[in-house]
Amino acid sequence: MIRFLLCSFALVLLYPTAIDLYLVGLPQIASDLGATESQLHIAFSVYLAGMATTMFFAGKLSDSIGRKPVAITGAIIFIFASLLGGQAESSNIFLIARFAQGVGAGSCYVVAFAILRDTLDDQRRAKVLSMLNGITCIVPVIAPVIGHLIMLKFPWPSLFSTMAGMGVVVCLLSTLVLKESNANRRSKKGIEGPDPQQSSDATLDSTEPFLERFFISRVVITSIGVTTILTYVNVSPMLVMDVMGFDRGGYSTTMALTALVSMLTSFSAPFLLGVFKQRSLMLFSQGLFATAAVVLLASGLGLLNQMANLVGFGLICAGFSIGFGVTMSQALSPFSLRAGMASSILGIAQVCASAFYIWLMGLLGVSALNMLIIILALGGVISTALILLVAQPSMPTSCKANEEITSTP
C-alpha cells in the first residue's frame, strides 16, 4: 500500500511544481527569448491547455492498458518537454515546451487519482486525498523559494533541468516501484462474454455510466471548488498589493500564511473524517466559503477594516482543504472499472470551468474582489443544494468486491 501512496503523491506533484518553479525566472526568460513578461504569462494557459487535452485520452488508456504504462509515458514526455523548455531560444519553442509539459503532467495527474481509486476504500481514500491536497498546497510556497536559490548560482534553464530531474524520479518510481493496480479490473472483463473487446464499452456504459446525477453533481461541486481557489490565487496580487497596500514582501508572507492554513486544515481532515460524516464536512466547507463571502463583502463595503480580507482568505483556503478531498473521493467511488476516465472527466471539468470563469469575469470587467465574492456566493449556493439534494448511492456490487480485494494487505 505504501508504494501506491508514494507513487501517487509523486505523480500529482509534477503538476503544481511545473507551474510555480519557473515563475521566479520569468524576467530573465523574457529577456533571453526577446519577449515581454506579459507575453510569456500565456505559458500558464498553454500549460493548462496541454493538461486538459491529454486528460481524456490518458484516462481512457489507463483503463484499457493499465496505470503503469501511462504514468511512465507521461513522466517521459514531461522530462523531454522540460529539457526542451530549458533549451528554448524563442518564445514559440518555449510555449510548445510548456504545452508538452502539460501533456506529461496531465497524464500523471489522472493516473494518480485512478490509482488511489483502485487501492483504497471510500473512507481511506477521502483521508488520503485530503492529505494529498495539503502537500500540494505547500508547493506554491516552496517552489519559488527553491527556484530563487537555484538562480542565485545558475541561469534560468537550470529551473527546467530541475523539473526534468523530478520527471526522472517519477519515471523511476513508476517503473521500479509502482505495481499495476488496474490488473484485476482488466481481468474482470472476462465475465462480459466471449468477445470482451466488442462488448466492453456497452457493458461499462450500462454498469458505470458517467451521465448519472450523483457523479455529475460531484463534478460540478469539485469544479466550483477549484474555480474558487484558482480565482483567489489569480486575484490575490491585486487584492493584497493594490487594495490592501502591501508590498511584494507582504504579499509573499500573506500567501505563505494562507498556504499554511491550507496545509494544516488538509492534515486535520483525516482526523475529522473519523468523527464526522463526509456529508457534514462537505456542508461545513460550504459554510466556510459563505462566511468568507460575507467577510469580503463587508470589507469591500467599508463595514470592516481591509485587514479583514486576510480572514476571508484563510476561510477560503480552509473551506477548499476540508471539502475537496472528500468530494473527489465520492466522485470516484462509483467507478471500479472506469476510474481513469472518471479522473479525466473531473480534471478536464475543473480546468475548463476555472479558465472559463476567470476569462468571463475579466471580459465583463468585474473587479477582483467582486469576482471572488461572486464565485463564493453563487458557487456556495449551487454546491450546498447539490450536497443536500443528491445523496451518495450505495456502492455497486462490483465496487464492493474490488475494494475487498484491493484493501487486503
Image (tube, rainbow, N blue to C red):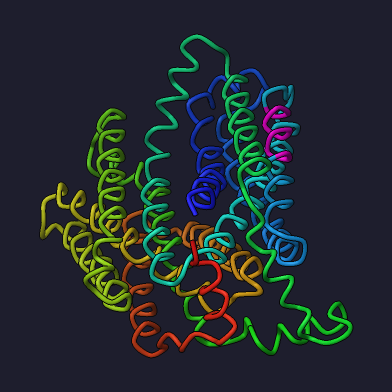
| 74 relative position to 320: left or right | right
The residue under the point 44% across, 21% down is: 148
**Would you identify the image quadrant in which residue 124 lies?**
bottom left
Left or right: 140 as drawn, with respect to 307: right
Residue located farthest toward the top when viewing the structure as drawn: 153
The part of the image, by quadrant, that contains residue 127 is: bottom left
Residues drawn in magenta? 76-85
Camera-side residue: 337 or 220?
Answer: 337
> At which x and y percent is residue 358?
49, 58
User: Is 83 colored magenta in this rendering?
Assistant: yes
Could you say which is closer to the camera, residue 318 or residue 380?
Answer: 318
Residue appearing at x 41%, y 39% in the figure:
140
- Measured as percent of width and height from the top left, residue 325 is found at 40, 63
Q: In the depicted view, which residue is nearer to us: 206 or 238?
A: 206
Point 63% across, 83% down: residue: 208
Residue at 61% from the left image edge and 70% from the top image edge: 342
- Looking at the image, residue 319 sits to the left or right of residue 106; the answer is left
